[in-house]
Amino acid sequence: MADPQAPTAASPAAALSDTELEILRLVATGATNREIAHARTISEATVKKHLTNINAKLGTANRTEAMRRALDTGLIALGDPSDGSPDGGGGDEDVRRSDGGAAARLAEELSRTRQRARRTVMLTLGGAALTVLAILGAATWRLTHGTATPTPPPTAPAPAPQDWVLGRQLPEARTGLAAVAAGADLFVIAGATDGGRLVSTTLQYAGGGGLDWRVRASKPTAVRDVAGVAVQGKIIVPGGCAADGRATGVVEIFDPRTDTWRTAAPLPAGRAVCGYGLAMLDGQVYLFGGRTDDDPSSATDAILRYDWSTDAWTVEPDRLLRPRADLAAAAFEGRIHVVGGRSPGGKPENNHWVFRPFEPSADRWDETAAPLPDARAGHALAVANVSGERLYVVGGGWSTHLDIGTLAYDLERGMWSEFAVVRGYTPDRGAGLAVLARQQLVLVGGQRLSGEPLRQTYLRPLKYEIVLPTGGQR
């Protein structure tokens, strides 16, 4: 006999989306709205909106009733009551068992969030305890030695904020280049120099010493407005604009070990691009947007994926939320941040979208991340996890020089901050940015608004990060 409480195609329970079901599973683990928001990379307001929709669909009044209704109807399932949990549920473990990989990843993220919160609480309590002990110690000293204030022992001054420092210049000015970190080394590939002449030389900076450039094998196809990523010790550079301003579909791979270039599978037919965003995630290379020539009206919303194991490109069914050219992308913990770029009308934008390729199709894009404080295009972007998980953005002034040329985005707190100042001249666009051996940022080349390409190289250690809040946060 059919279960009268089981959801049917016409029942409110059956109308729950995959996102709402995953939120219900997290509610069942005891997660707070804040923890759910972090696990799903959405705002707490969005979590509350989802919970309101869930209650409306299930005919419940609050999250507890919704969870019970979902358990009763079999929408979500916790573990076997014999698993040792006092209430018959296994918490995050049950979420991992209940419905595939998506819930498992969310539960693991929730666990990491709780661990970080516990560490923060312990540090706060420890600091409070030390403060109390210091006050008691000072009071005891005054009672036994009188009221005179003792001379404090000398202390080392706090480290001053570190700006970018000038390194060894590039052999020649270069803009529209690809800057790729491979191990402890930085590689600068392709681009354009004075007069728009294309450059094919590959340059290498060996990390760990003073900045010094070494010339490596030239890229067979000279292009500009490109990006590259390292995969299995090799560097892939797709597309780019040729001397006539038209995009090419040629894809080439550099092997630093043998100092050789080879040709890979070209971009899909009709998909030649330059000025795109590029990121590597789990051995797959994702290419976002771009343009087919120097006219921004050719901006596209396509997403291309390259499978390293099969040497094949695929046009993804997902698309950018809106067409963008001269954008930037960076991957971190299963997600790709797509930042800024120009609309088909040529206007720089401040979008900050998060692409989650391993989620169900309807949930792959998240627009709730804090947008850039100002619109940017042609900027450089890198990600590092040293003394904090941060995105770094440099430049991006397409038609106006930006007063705040460098920004950092705290991935934990969801806030943009002003980062270290480039004392010389922040490149307006076309520069390269990379993180070497998790120790320092390297900023190379680029150009001024006038179009003048730059030779400057700047370094910024990542041991001490002092950032100042700026606008556009939420």
Image (cartoon, grey):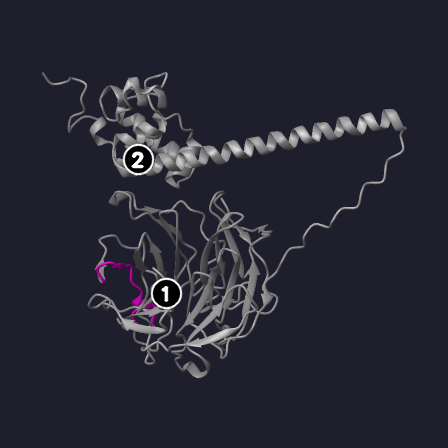
The answer to which of marks 2 and 1 sits earlier in the sequence is 2
How crowded pointer 1 is (Cα within 10 Å; few <14, some 14-19, many 20+) is rated as many
Residue 211 position (above or below residue 24): below
State yes or no: residue 204 in magenta: no
State yes or no: residue 296 in magenta: yes
Q: Which residues are magenta?
A: 292-311
Q: Which disc is residue 60 wearing?
A: none
How crowded pointer 2 is (Cα within 10 Å; few <14, some 14-19, many 20+) is rated as many
Q: How many marks?
A: 2
Q: Which residue is mark 2?
A: 103
**Residue at the extreme left:** 1
| Residue type indicated by callout 2 | Ala
Q: Position of residue 396 (x, y in %)?
A: 47, 64
- For the point 40% across and 82% down, the residue is 197
Residue 456 position (above or below residue 97): below
| Residue type indicated by callout 1 | Gly
> Residue 358 occupies which quadrant of the picture?
top left
Nearest to the observer: residue 287 or residue 280: 280
- For the point 76% across and 26% down, the residue is 136
Whether the residues at callouts 2 and 1 have beta carbons within 8 Å, the answer is no
Nearest to the observer: residue 1 or residue 217: 217
Q: Position of residue 194 (x, y in %)?
A: 46, 82
Q: Which residue is mark 1?
A: 228
